[in-house]
Amino acid sequence: MKNTKTPGLIILILSALGIALSGYLTYLYYAKAQAAFCTVGSGCDTVRESPYSIILGVPVSVFGVIGYLSILILSLVSISYGRAKWLLLYFLSLVGFAFSAYLTYIELFVIKAICPYCVASAFIITGILITLIIGKPDPLPRSSFKFALISGVLVLPVLLVSVSLQSKGLRAGSEDTWRVGLAKHLAEVGATMYGAYWCHHCMEQKGLFGDAFKYIKYVECDPGGERANLALCYEKGIKVYPTWEIRGNFYTGVRSLEELSDLSGYKEIK
């Protein structure tokens, strides 16, 4: 007879870790804070600020908290590790695994950036599902086994199609996410754009970034502009607008985002 306490304990520990991880990501979202061990403009930011990180106006991490919490509560419902309990846990973990697989696909092939925290969550839910499969009650009634197989066949495509429909049309949003990542990376490496408020080319350069330009370090070189810093512009020898200073080198004129990405060493792919 199988030891029914061991898988229950493992699931309890993994679900608790999942709650802590998802709860932390939820806190970061609402606090607009920077994730620990992740540099500004890294894959963490790219994934977290992508349109795929929200479903129906709710952060994906909130669904993670709900899912892991449901698994944890169900694990504590009774001391016994019965068949009905196993089926419910199996179904919940299967849904979580399918959802995590979809998000991993989005990271790899749509956003093209990896969030270590999301990867950790994927390993946790996978660990729970594997533990359940290995610790399956023996013998499991034929009807219950059929239910497990049918749910496995149906849940994966239904969930993927449902979430895909919600995400349809968000591919363009991933480009906005890339702009934000590039802008934050430029700020991190100390890149500076020098310009003047009346400069048409400066406006064109700002327009390429859109809302992401708020992360760019910009220095106004005309005395009539807001917060002008003539001394710094003179010190740097700025004569053409716009002028970029990146890693100690100066580049004049409007630069494409792809060119700025290459010049600054931004590795994320658009």
Image (cartoon, rainbow, N blue to C red):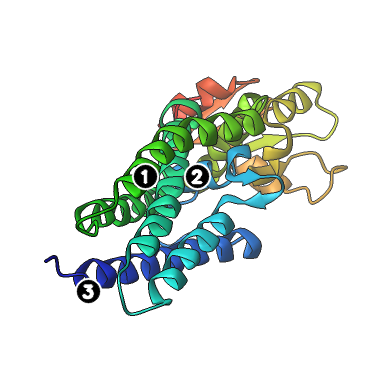
Could you tell which of marks 1 and 3 lies nearer the N-terminus?
3
Please name the residue that numbered disc 3 is placed on.
5
Say whether residue 41 is visible: yes
Find numbered disc 3 in the image and state the secondary structure of the residue it sits on: helix
Could you say where residue 261 lies in the image, as x and y percent from the top left?
Answer: 49, 28
| Mark 2 nearby-residue class (10 Å; few <14, some 14–19, many ≥20) | many
Can you say whether 20 is above or below 246 in the image?
A: below
Q: What residue type is labelled 2?
A: Gly
Q: Is residue 41 left or right of residue 142?
A: right
| Residue in view at x 31 percent, y 49 percent | 126
Q: Is residue 200 left or right of residue 123?
A: right
Please name the residue that numbered disc 2 is placed on.
41
In whole angstroms, how far apart are the C-alphas of marks 3 and 2? 44 Å
The picture quadrant where one finds residue 145 is top left
Which dot, 3 or 2, sits closer to the camera?
3
Please name the residue that numbered disc 1 is placed on.
148
Find numbered disc 1 in the image and state the secondary structure of the residue it sits on: helix
Q: What residue type is labelled 1?
A: Ala
Which dot, 1 or 3, sits closer to the camera?
1
Could you tell which of marks 3 and 2 lies nearer the N-terminus?
3
